[in-house]
Amino acid sequence: TSWQDAAQTSLPNEYPVSSLQMGMLFHSQMTQQSISYHDISSYRLDFLVDVDALKAVLETLVQRHEILRTVFDLSNPTHPVQRVLPRHEVPLSVVDLQAENEDSQGFALENGLKAEKRRGFAWDKTPPWRVIVHLLSAQQSQVSLSFHHALLDGWSEASLMSELLGQYRHYLATRTLNQAPLKVQYRDFIQQEQAALLDPAQQAFWTDYLAG
């Protein structure tokens, strides 16, 4: 099949979802009101975020990381795919709370993130992630990354935020960004998983193992 060929060569910009992704997307689709796989990681920063600089960094990350340009198409249940878009506008929203007192800020933050959690994602049309910045004072901001777990897991989210903050600091100091392409993308894992699923030795091993 075409996917057998793809498992042995480079994958196109449309390729299968992983087994783990399929499970999470399936459960989210079946229970659309569920927020089980909608994660929000929120960080309090001891500085006022330069929104233009942050947007420039996010634009660079979107181009470097294919997963941030990925949508999911489950319309064919026997052939669910993920598709990498050539470009994607940064989904950044900014809420300025600097004129509010601490209690009002806390209320706005809590309710704003609860509302974000309820929004959900149209993952067949747009990559399922968003960034929300709350400006609190000249010395504090809160940056929140909202995403579906099929797109990012805990380790990759931490790695992405580390890269974002590192690039942000570098950009403020030098007005330059690391735009070098990544050596490994998620498609490389998909290629390995597809090859393993088609490997007779792998199939024989798991058949014997599960048979006891």
Image (tube, grey):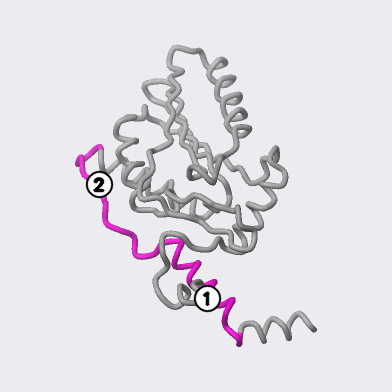
Is 196 left or right of 138, judged from the image as shown?
right
Precedes in sequence: disc 1 or disc 2:
1
Q: Position of residue 109 (x, y in %)?
A: 55, 25
Is 107 left or right of 58, judged from the image as shown?
right
User: Of the residues tagged 1 and 2, which is closer to the observer?
Assistant: 1
Residues rendered magenta in the picture: 172-201
> Does 198 appear above or below 183?
below
Hey, which residue is sitting farthest right in the picture? 212
Q: Give me the residue at 30% from left, 38% from top.
A: 56
Residue 190 lies in the magenta-colored region: yes
Q: Position of residue 31 (x, y in %)?
A: 72, 43
Q: Secondary structure at mark 2?
A: loop
Q: Give me the residue at 30% from left, 31% from top.
A: 52
> Does 131 appear above or below 11?
above
Q: Give me the residue at 56% from left, 77% from top.
A: 196
Residue kind at label 1, given as amino acid type = Thr
> Does 50 appear above or below 181?
above
Query: Disc 2 marks which residue?
Result: 177
Residue 137 occupies quadrant: top left
Q: Position of residue 74 (x, y in %)?
A: 60, 53
3D distance between C-alphas at marks 1 and 2: 41 Å
Between 197 and 183, the one nearer to me in the picture: 197
Other-residue count near label 1 (Cα within 10 Å), few / some / many at <14 / 14–19 / ≥20: few
Q: Secondary structure at mark 1?
A: loop
Q: Give me the residue at 49% from left, 35% from top.
A: 144
Query: Disc 1 marks which residue?
Result: 1
Residue kind at label 2, given as amino acid type = Leu
Between 175 and 115, the one nearer to me in the picture: 115
Residue 168 lies in the magenta-colored region: no
